Image: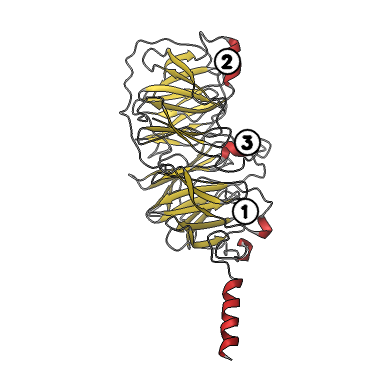
Amino acid sequence: MKKLLLIFFVAALSSCSFDNKTGIWKDASDLPEINQTSKPILNDQTDTRYENIVTKKDTFNSEKDSVTPIKLDNTVKIANWFEEYAIPTNNISNFYYDGNKILLSKSRKLSQNFDKKNNFNKQYIFYKDNLISYDHKGKIYSYSIKSNKKVLEYNFYQKNFKKFRKKLNFIVNENILYVADNIGYLYSINLDNFSIVWAKNYGIPFRSNLKLENNQIFLSNQDNVIYSIDAKTGNKNWEFATGSTFLKSDFINNFALDITTNNLYFLNTSGELYSINYLTQKINWVLNFKNPLSSGETDLFLSYPLIIKDNNMIVSTEKSIVNYDTFTGVRKWILYSEPIAKPIITQRYTFAVLSNNLLICVDNISGNVVWAKNFYTNIKEKQIRKFGSIIDFKIVNGKINIYYNQGYLLSFDPINHQLISSNRISKKGLISKIFFLKGNMLMIDNNNKLLKYN
């Protein structure tokens, strides 16, 4: 009898999946869906208004010289890339880089490639000298930069989702990785051993970056519903439904966080911008960028991620760059233009790259363009065609850098706005943005290999 019981116990254990390759459950679909009803956020705000940011004037389209001395913020040296845009405000105004441009290491192929579009949209986290990302099957891996090898892997998805293309969004805090996906799952992983901590099934795909503060995870689903989740348990604190749209675009819901004021800013796909105090759970103000009198659903709202610096918040849409007061939501200025990358905001200036090949510097106080430069001046047309498309835009060591998917880098002087150098930093091209950590520059090339320069 004892032998039979022992055999039964061993068989029962073997039928469960507690290994790090398959996860706690045989399949993520075993998780029941979370009840979507909960305590709503307070919605008693009175300051809700329509903001017209549709082009009224001609789009800015002229070069401008200036002798105004430009002073940039001090360089920032970071050790970890905790979330999609590194820090809560989505903005680092001047990265520190050793600048030797020496290739220190090149990894093996990290994973099988997605299609080109999804390759670039993959998320990468750098934490404690490890690169954390995922492959085409949704398997999350940790790659040690020091030892140049994968150290851990974890796959939350099995049978039912094997052929479904996953889009994962990450944020990491105190050795716990939080993951939201385009199926509707939210789960956390202990990075010491890649074991699951908790997992929840919300049934509706998540479609936003993640923010974390005060033990709360903030994220949104594709219906523009904001969630506050307890980071320790995965339980829902509150939810709030914002305006939705039936049409889907490449723009996803975007959060920015100001921990000095305890305010969460949320820009959704229907063109609404919310300021919410995440401690009191009260809405401060709401801006609506789509005219409520129009048909609405025929017009897509497109924008780049929100960025914050001090009391300035930049909203950059396909038709304008706008600066708002973070406390009141009052517009400071608007520049009718067509940005093609997330702008950079410093204490005094905002820098942007426009579709008409202009690199511009805007005064944060007046909204006046200080200078504007065609960044292809003195570059031959034949060479320009080799660059490909712009994939990233950063200020590094006080120089304005534009990065291209074919691996090229253009570097400009912010004072005289002249081209300093034109280099190819990756012969294989790039499928990621550029990361700066501990004075090193890191990127993923078209062969899905991690390149590290000092």
Position in image of residue 360 (x %, y %): 46, 19
Tell me whether circle 2 and circle 3 mark residues in contact (CB < 8 Å).
Answer: no
In the image, what residue type sits under mark 2? Ile
**Among numbered discs 1 and 2, the one appearing first in the sequence:** 1
Nearest the viewer among 299 and 16 is 16
**Residue denoted by label 2:** 384
Nearest the viewer among 325 and 149 is 149
> Is residue 197 positioned above or below 441 on the image?
below
Q: Is residue 32 left or right of residue 400?
A: right
**Residue denoted by label 3:** 117
Tell me whether circle 1 and circle 2 mark residues in contact (CB < 8 Å).
Answer: no
As measured in the structure, the alpha-carbon distance from the residue carrying label 3 to the one carrying label 1 is: 19 Å
Q: Residue furthest bottom?
A: 1
Position in image of residue 347 (x %, y %): 34, 29
**Residue denoted by label 1:** 183
**Among numbered discs 3 and 1, the one appearing first in the sequence:** 3
> Is residue 208 positioned above or below 93 on the image?
below
Q: Could one spot residue 292 in this view of the protein?
A: no
Q: Is residue 91 left or right of residue 110?
A: left
In the image, what residue type sits under mark 3? Lys
As measured in the structure, the alpha-carbon distance from the residue carrying label 1 to the one carrying label 2 is: 40 Å
Residue at (62% x, 46% y) in the render = 136
As measured in the structure, the alpha-carbon distance from the residue carrying label 2 to the one carrying label 3 is: 22 Å
Nearest the viewer among 3 and 375 is 3
